[in-house]
Image: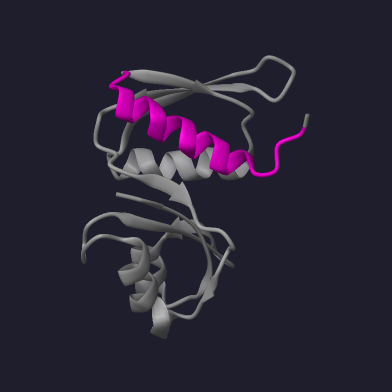
Amino acid sequence: MSMNDPLANVLSHINNCEKTGKIDCTVRPSSKIIIKVLNIMKDHDYIKDMTITEDGKGNIIKVGLLGNINQCNVIKPRLSFKIHNMEKFEKRFLLARDFGILIVSTPKGIMTHLEAKDKKIGGRLIAYVY
């Protein structure tokens, strides 16, 4: 059976493992987008580390959890934004100003909404974490 949205499955599995108090979780399959999103979460101290194991069927990612995630989810549909209306999406998806991150896809790559503001580029919303 094929998955409709592997990124949504990975983030919901991480969210469920955080809520149950586990210290690590195993997710599969891996893709470039999933790895980039997890790297952003690691850079902002939402997860401890991740290791990728190749198994020939889509690879397995073992994610170390810190207990810092209150909520993480994908944004469906993938809404497009321009830099001048980013404030509207911050209010919609994040609890408070400077609390959490929006992960966005831009022509310059996948980054947080704060980096997109600094570079003054728009794109599409992928996920949020707080």
Establish if 84 lies above or below 113. Answer: below
Q: Is residue 99 magenta?
A: no
In the figure, is residue 33 to the left or right of 25?
right
Q: How is the image coloured?
A: one colour
User: Which segment did they paint magenta?
Assistant: 2-22
The residue depicted at 43 percent of the width and 26 percent of the height is 50
Q: Looking at this rendering, what residue extends furthest in the right direction?
A: 1
Residue 76, given in percent of the width and then of the height, sits at 56, 59
Magenta segment's dominant SS is: helix
Establish if 85 lies above or below 57. Answer: below
Quadrant showing the N terminus: top right
Residue 59, given in percent of the width and then of the height, sits at 65, 22
The residue depicted at 48 percent of the width and 80 percent of the height is 82
Q: Is residue 15 magenta?
A: yes
Q: Quadrant of residue 43?
A: top left
In the figure, is residue 64 to the left or right of 100?
right
In the figure, is residue 71 to the left or right of 107?
left
Q: Quadrant of residue 29?
A: top right
Residue 44, given in percent of the width and then of the height, sits at 30, 45
The residue depicted at 28 percent of the width and 54 percent of the height is 100
